[in-house]
Image (spheres, rainbow, N blue to C red):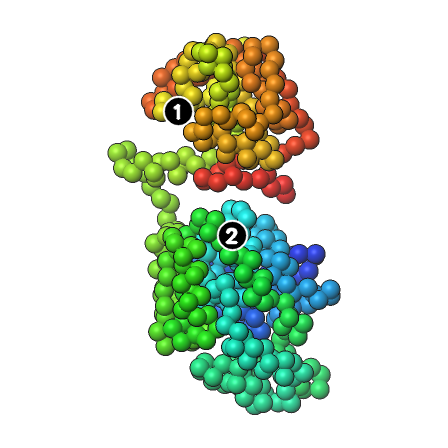
């Protein structure tokens, strides 16, 4: 596999241009690698070449104010700005990548994927990135970076500064370090980053993620250098408690810069995780095998979300959330919705001669969750009305369709309920609430 890289450019938050490189075949599964602070995308080169050789498409990217990416004219290097950049990049990719983030890159990945953003990625690898930075080590590093922000007279002085910054790290040769530095017309060498970034991310911003990372449901691996002074064992223990499904690897004889200090171990560990949790080959279901695999395969078909409603035998409103819904015919006007035989509401639909289907928009996710629960009163917090048949109509839905029961069919562990449409109304200015691979999604227009 060639180590040649193709130049790429992404548009980040506020139109800021982000420089990147792609390694391998773009048709292969994507791995997006985010470097740490005061670094640039070139620190990932060994890993990117290994990923490409293993049949992945690796994209290395310079964070804002780093490497060849644009500096923020407004001086914004806060965690929210970085996270907005990453979400913008993920929106520009054709597939959902695995995101690998080291140090600040890991903080950025967690911030971008909190609050539902994990739908934009298929996996997450955090490399020596917890939810706090050890204050003493963070201050030491920051002081060194600030002291040398005005550059070096020669490459030998730059090597000395690099050694001071990372005493545990293998010393860089002048030739290798030169590739990572910026040189002006007078021959002075500079680390390739905007000094303003040093004030951008702090522990207060990271602490705000405490209540959000537990919502991440994608395959995740946490990796720490055993000798790291930036991310402590206690911090990783806290992160693991918040993300109990995440795998954890501690790399011996490595400090904060795990990927470069122990590239052999890092690359092997990353590739093993990817092949085991996110394999390149399609996951296959055979008749009689794990039903969950079939369910996941069916989940690849993105659907809308509806709440089907009716009146029970005693006239009380009843309903449930469903995504097995489709239009059947226009002449006569027929639709169907599938109801699990285990559903508490099934008896109400069986006894009633009419029902309604309410198609939900993106602002009705709470309604979807409420009607999916086995609560006794699902209507107390919902605004609803009735039309001709008395079936409950959820107000302000994307569309509401009132039906007479037309047919009732057995469908394995579900009942197929076919309705003949009496009346329908819809709101043309809203977007649908979508469901894909076990999670709510929003329509992405390109």
Callout 1 touching callout 2 (CB < 8 Å): no
Mark 2 burial class by Cα count in 10 Å: few <14, some 14-19, many 20+: some
Q: Nearer the viewer, residue 250 or 369?
A: 369
Residue 224 appears in the picture as rendered? no
As helix, strand or loop, the secondary structure at mark 1 comes to loop
Residue lying at 68% horizontally and 64% vertically, measured from the top left: 76
Q: Nearer the viewer, residue 40 or 313?
A: 313
Q: Nearer the viewer, residue 197 or 154?
A: 197
Mark 1, residue position: 343
The image position of residue 362, as x and y in percent, is: 60, 36
Mark 2, residue position: 212
Q: Quadrant of residue 159?
A: bottom right
| Label 1 or label 2, whichever comes before in sequence order | 2
61 in relation to 117, above or below: below
State the residue lying farthest toward the left: 288
What is the spatial separation of the Cα atoms under label 1 and label 2, in whole angstroms? 31 Å
333 in relation to 211, above or below: above
Residue 277 appears in the picture as rendered? yes
The image position of residue 136, as x and y in percent, is: 52, 77
């Amino acid at each position: 596999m060639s180590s040649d890289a193709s130049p790429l450019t992404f548009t980040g938050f506020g139109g800021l241009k982000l420089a990147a490189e792609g390694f391998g075949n773009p048709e292969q599964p994507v791995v997006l690698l985010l470097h740490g602070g005061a670094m640039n995308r070139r620190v990932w080169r060994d890993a990117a070449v290994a990923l490409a050789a293993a049949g992945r498409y690796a994209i290395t990217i310079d964070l804002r104010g780093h490497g060849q990416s644009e500096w923020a004219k407004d001086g914004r290097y806060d965690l929210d700005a970085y996270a907005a950049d990453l979400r913008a990049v993920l929106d520009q990719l054709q597939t959902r990548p695995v995101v690998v983030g080291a140090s600040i890159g890991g903080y950025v990945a967690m911030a971008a994927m909190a609050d539902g953003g994990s739908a934009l990625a298929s996996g997450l690898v955090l490399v020596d990135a917890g939810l706090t930075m050890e204050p003493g080590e963070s201050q030491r590093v920051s002081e060194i970076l600030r002291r040398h922000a005005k550059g070096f007279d020669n490459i030998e002085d730059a090597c000395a500064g690099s050694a001071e910054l990372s005493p545990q790290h293998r010393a860089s040769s002048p030739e290798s370090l030169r590739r990572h530095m910026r040189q002006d017309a007078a021959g002075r060498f500079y680390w390739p980053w905007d000094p303003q970034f040093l004030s951008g991310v702090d522990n207060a911003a990271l602490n705000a993620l405490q209540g959000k990372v537990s919502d991440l449901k994608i395959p995740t691996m946490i990796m720490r250098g055993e000798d790291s002074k930036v991310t402590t064992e206690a911090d990783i223990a806290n992160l693991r408690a918040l993300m109990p499904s995440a795998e954890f690897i501690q790399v011996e004889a490595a400090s904060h810069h795990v990927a470069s200090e122990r590239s052999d171990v890092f690359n092997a560990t990353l590739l093993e995780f990817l092949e085991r949790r996110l394999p390149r080959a399609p996951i296959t279901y055979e008749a009689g095998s794990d039903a969950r695999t079939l369910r996941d395969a069916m989940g690849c078909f993105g659907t809308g979300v509806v709440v089907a409603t009716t009146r029970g035998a005693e006239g009380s409103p009843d309903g449930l959330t469903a995504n097995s819904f489709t239009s059947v015919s226009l002449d006569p006007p027929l639709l169907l919705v599938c109801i699990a035989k285990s559903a508490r509401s099934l008896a109400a639909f069986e006894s009633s001669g009419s029902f309604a289907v309410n198609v939900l928009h993106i602002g009705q996710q709470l309604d979807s969750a409420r009607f999916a629960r086995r609560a006794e009163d699902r209507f107390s917090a919902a605004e609803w009305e009735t039309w001709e048949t008395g079936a409950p109509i959820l107000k302000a839905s994307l569309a509401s369709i009132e039906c007479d029961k037309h047919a009732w069919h057995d469908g394995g562990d579900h009942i197929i309920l076919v309705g003949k449409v009496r009346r329908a109304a819809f709101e043309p200015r809203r977007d649908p609430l979508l469901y894909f691979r076990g999670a709510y999604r929003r329509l992405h227009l390109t």
